[in-house]
Image (spheres, helix red, strand yellow):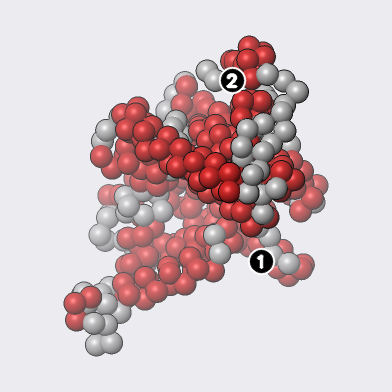
Amino acid sequence: MEKHQRVSEKLNRFELLLFDTLALGLVIFYSYSAVLEPAATQFHRGIYVVITYVLVFLVYRSRGTIGRAWDYLLMLTSIGALGYWIYNFEAINYRAGAETELDQWIAMIGVLVGIEVARRVVGSVFVIIGTVMLLYGVFGDSEYVPEVLQHAGDTFPYLCTSIFYKSDGVFGIMANVLATYIILFVIFGAFLEKSGAQRFFIDFPLAAVGHKIGGPGKVSVIASGLFGSISGSAIANTVSTGAFTIPMMKKAGFRPHVAGGIEPAASIGGMFMPPIMGAGGFIMAELTGLPYSQIMLVAIFPALMYFFSVFMMVHYEAKKYNIVGERSKEKPGDILRREWFYIL
């Protein structure tokens, strides 16, 4: 609810309606595709990428009227370039290696728009790295490149064609993993969060260890581990649990920078805490051909060891400064009996 409220504050009525429609369409399409009838490859991957691009330009908006007009132009460009791949999927595959001039122009536009999407979400560092890699791909045979790193090089249009159309490009493994696995777990995690599981993930550890040495910090670690198991996102984990645990840690006596460090350190573990583990686990399953269930089983022990190490560091930090939390009004057994179903 809070995330939707923050989005609604940025968007006008039409944009909010468009955002809700696209997001709802994404949920319905991939739920239907997963449960009833799998979609064809071009629709399965393409629709996810198209809607993601449009949502990014909606939410990560430019400033001013001219900037917003530029955002709309980028949305239309995204739909055109990505829609071209969806519509001409079979034809492009048949003429692989002999792409037309139009194919190359669409690929160049698609790659540049993709870099802009990444810039808005991740930051300028990605643009710099991506630009350097593109230049290296084009000018790999330059005398200014160290001999050990030189290669034959390629033209910019053909390089973009490979990035945009090939199986390891924009619509490749990452798009398949995101559209096949991650979106379903994100939907599941959002359902749990709205049903009250997030509150349980904080209340239970608060009742169990909140009154012990370093209690608030330990609550942060346990809550981050539990919430991370359904979110798979370090950022979402930090924002969701940190809004409650960081003020609680500071109030208990943790130094502000320590409290601010404990929460993200614990939240990062959510990226490899089964069952979701961010995108990493799904990519490993896709590349190795192993069942995702096997990847999860292997990941359990290192994930638990990571959280245990953070837990112990919190314990000794709190012991050093004699930081003790307050006892919860409820007992952990009572919370567990009342809300045990969230564990399932």
195 or 28: nearer the viewer: 195
Quarter of the image for residue 275 reads: top left
Q: Left of 288 or right of it: where is 271? A: right
Please tell me whether residue 281 is drawn above or below residue 166 in the rendered image: above
Q: Which residue is mark 2?
A: 342
The disc, 2 or 1, on the residue closer to the chain's N-terminal end is: 1
At label 2, the amino acid type is Tyr
Residue 169: percent from left, percent from top = 36, 54
Please tell me whether residue 58 is drawn above or below residue 63 in the rendered image: above
Residues under numbered marks 2 and 1 in contact, where contact means CB atoms less than 8 Å apart: no
Tell how many labels: 2
Q: Which residue is mark 1?
A: 70
Dot 2 lies on which element?
A: helix
203 or 30: nearer the viewer: 203
Residue 106: percent from left, percent from top = 44, 62
Badge number at residue 340: none
Task: Work out whether residue 16 can be spotted.
Answer: no
Q: Left of 262 or right of it: where is 172? A: left
At label 1, the amino acid type is Trp
